[in-house]
Amino acid sequence: MSGCPVQLHGPRFQTDPGGLYEQMRTEHGPVVPVTMEGGVPAWLVIGYRELHHVLNSPSVYARSSRRWNAWDLVPEDWPLLPMVMQLPTVLHSEGDEHRRRAGAVSDALSGTDLHELRATTVRMADRLIDSFCGSTGTDLRTSYTARLPALVLSWMYGLDAVRGDHLADNMNKMIDGGADAMAAQQALMAAMGELVAERRAEPGPDVVSRLLAHPAGYTDEEAVPELIVLLGGGNQPTAEWLGNALRLMFTDDRFGASIAGARNSVQEALNEVLWEDTPTQIHAGRFAVHDVELGGQLVRQGDLVLLGLSGANRDPLVRSGADRVGDRGSQAHLSFSHGPHQCPYPAREIAEIIAVTGVEVLVDRLPDIELDLPQTELRWRPSPWVRGVASLPVTFTPTEPIGTP
């Protein structure tokens, strides 16, 4: 198959991603030629089976961006540069080096006491709700969903709320790929460098200290970008997951009982979001080790292969028919990726605890909460890479703060 490349930007990624992916599939099949900002070319894999194959074939579709054959097309101020630049992290490493890093990251995260994590999430959620529950409404995105994961992750890193919010703000700017992306990335590096130096001098019961003390033997230079990767992988996707689940519960009658206080369908709503509005829509990426045929397309050595997680989750071949895997209760979505570079299991547990607890505490505290505008007027964030509402205005009956310490 061939055809004109699809521009990987524009309003349809916000207004009608399902229709856009269907059109891509009709015109190009499961592997789509695309151009990113500045006309930089890539392949976008939106077929479920094709993406599953890519994720499980690191010897053919490798992780290191040093292999990329289009570096000469990338300007120094390219806004997407932070997403592909080669850094010494678990995301970009391969082989034994990746196994060393992945083991250390998983161990550092798994040292988190999940009962303490849940209690901390409840406390942080109550503190945020206290700040707006006395009014009649708020924008949940700015006052709650975008802040709760940052506060909890800051606690995991041993940071206070102010430093945690600062890190999260720069992370959002970097991932959005706008004009401030590179400046935000540099600010993150500087802030994390300070934190690593602090923990090296005075370790504590936190993720940073556990990573530095791990037998993998991280240097400070290795630890700084690794910890930024962990923060980014935990903060923004969890915030969008929480926000997207609340949006679904506010707008779909099937989840009305949850807003009234029932908890049994919170998990169902969160899982459905991973199929229909997964926070990470597209992930960069893999690089072809040699020329290879994929989904009817000839992928050349060094070509960038983008992981179309959302497109693959919407693939009609796995959403209908005898081999259907896309039922709403199924866990077979690719939203946490798959294969050697998939999201570590401890990270999934942490994200799920934050998201579930965030929904439950909110609907317990504000049982009559509802959306403050028609569903059709909701606007999504301007990025093909992530999926999340730009704002989530709600109304509710004022209540007294509980005075969370």
Image: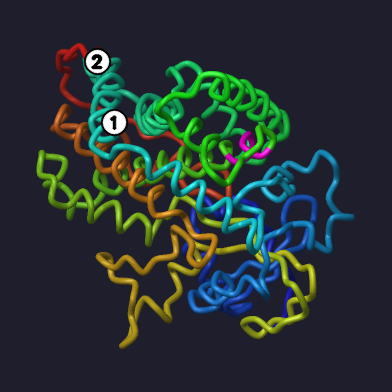
Image location (x, y in percent) of residue 108: 45, 41
Residue furthest to the right:
72
Q: Residue at x 55, y 26 (%)?
A: 167
Position of 310 with respect to 399 (left or right) is right
358 in the magenta segment: no
Pick the residue in front: 155 or 332: 155
Q: In the rendering, which numbered label is found on residue 362? A: none
Q: Extreme bottom residue here?
A: 322
Q: On the rendered image, what quadrant is the C terminus found in?
A: top left
Q: Quickly name the residue at label 1.
A: 121
Percent of width and height locating residue 154: 44, 27
Quarter of image, res 198: top right
Majority secondary structure in the magenta region: helix
Image point 35% across, 43% down: which residue? 350
Residue 135 bears which disc, if any? 2
Say if 380 sits above or below 322 in the image.
Answer: above
- From mark 2 to mark 1, how far is it between C-alphas? 22 Å
Going from N to C along the chain, the mark reached first, 2 or 1, is 1
Quadrant of res 156: top left
Indicate the amino acid at tag 1: Thr
Q: Residues within 10 Å of mark 2 (few under 14, many from 20)?
A: some
For the residue pair 291 and 297, the one nearer the viewer reads as 291
State the extent of the magenta-drawn residues as a range: 222-226
